[in-house]
Amino acid sequence: MNKKLHNISIFGTSSDAGKSTITFVIAKILQDLGVSVAPFKAQNVSNNSHVCDDGSEIAIAQYFQAEVLGVKTSYHLNPVLLKSGRGSSASLIVEGKVVTNKDVREYYRDLDLLKPAVKRCFDYLDAKYDCVVCEGAGSPVELNLMDKDLSNIFIATEYNTKIILVADIEKGGVFASIWGVYNLLPEKLRKNVIGVIVNKFRGDLTLFDEGIRIIEEEFKIPVLGVLPYLPFNLGFEDSASLKNFVQQPRNKKLDIAVIAYPYMSNYNDFEPLIADDEVFVEFVSSNISLEKFDLVILPGSKLVIKDLKWLKESGLFEQIKNYEKDICAICGGYEMMFENLEDKYSLENEEAIKEEGFALIDDVITFEKEKILEKKTYDLFGEKIEGFEIHHGMCQNYPLSFEKQNFKGTFVHQIFDNNEFRTKYFKSIKADYIGFDFQEYKKQTVDNFISTLKAKLDVEHLIKSIS
């Protein structure tokens, strides 16, 4: 099969219904049938982003979807990205570059100005691929926001996409959510709904046979499949999905604390640790004792000085300062380790501000207007490590990393994806640590996930509906 198909919109009947995973599952099924396919999300709200092959910045979900599909990454996959900003503002990233900090109300008022960028990116993908699978955002029928909705209604209306509804049965109220969303859609879009996927079902799927009959016969909506609840500890998009991770290390050697400050970002850095059978990861968001941990990690942060102040107020700052075992700091966490942090242009704070850091590194971090976006192979900690940088903070003496005694710090994300570095590092902390191949784990997890869900989906009806 290799011809132009209708593009698809994946609408959730609620937030966190599983749109991101269903998007790459549907896309991969089509790709395996010979269809050239790309993922797309017009607008995303996430502090979790990644640098693309073209040096632009997009949300992690679209990057991960593209990675699963082996599609070259670029800003076209996610033209508009909003990240936490100072006060009630958000950092606005359009076509892969930071445009401005905007008040959220102002952002919604000026939404029409973003539509050309969304259309440019969609048109680019549409011309290049047989099918674009578009992930929606939240619920598509927030009636007070429907005219301000770029990811759902705008795309579906503008491009006449075929719509798949995804309902999360675990939340309860699955019939009301399906019926409500379907009937609140504009009539033109209702006609484009090709079916509903009931997601995250726990237990015997045949228990929902009567549910399928009700949806198909009484609601008149085809059921494309009832999918089992499968933990999927990859591609974490937001803190909600992060909190849902499941970890049961059978051969635990290390206890690792990741300091979960309020504006923590890029927690995909820890997927290799969550997947590791020899590691237990705890996300620490209050002043608990750190003594039981073998390693403390300070992750990235979207608002570094605010998170640094939070560490001081919570009491964790003193604990980390006095912690005598291993510490690793990444990006925002790395910046906190310097003597002082200066936000002279008020990039992250309401006013120009200077804050004392941990003073482990004899240098100053200055937040510069021009953001560093870099994706490459780095010489780091004695290894060649593929990773990326995404930061405003700059320093004179240690622009990439710093290492001494039991401390390692770097601006580079994804260091734990590197098997050699991770194994060597963890062995230095616990000699009996063995290690594993994260890339192989990732491939197997994705393949198993897709094949399990594919078996539960009516692929024939899907293909017929978009042909």
Image: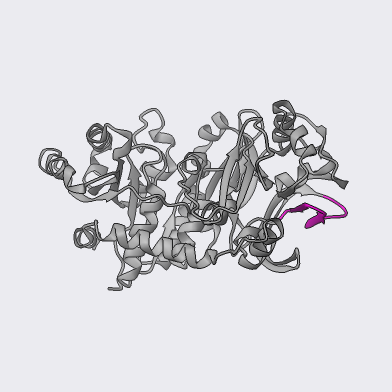
Residue toward you, 144 or 19: 19
Residue drawn at x 66%, y 58% as measured from the top left: 426
In this picture, residue 196 sits left or right of residue 358: left
State whether residue 124 appears in this view.
no
Residue 203 vertical placement versus 37 (above, below): above
Residue drawn at x 67%, y 48% as measured from the top left: 294
- List the single residue furthest toward the right: 362
Q: Which residues are magenta?
A: 395-411
Q: Quadrant of the C terminus?
A: bottom left
In this picture, residue 342 sits left or right of residue 154: right
Q: Where is residue 369 shown, x and y percent of the image?
A: 75, 45
Can residue 421 be found in the magenta stretch? no
- Locate residue 291: give its quadrant: top right
State whether residue 211 appears in this view.
yes
Residue 72 vertical placement versus 360 (above, below): below
Residue toward you, 457 or 314: 314
- Locate residue 12: give its quadrant: top left
Q: Where is residue 207 shown, x and y percent of the image?
A: 17, 43
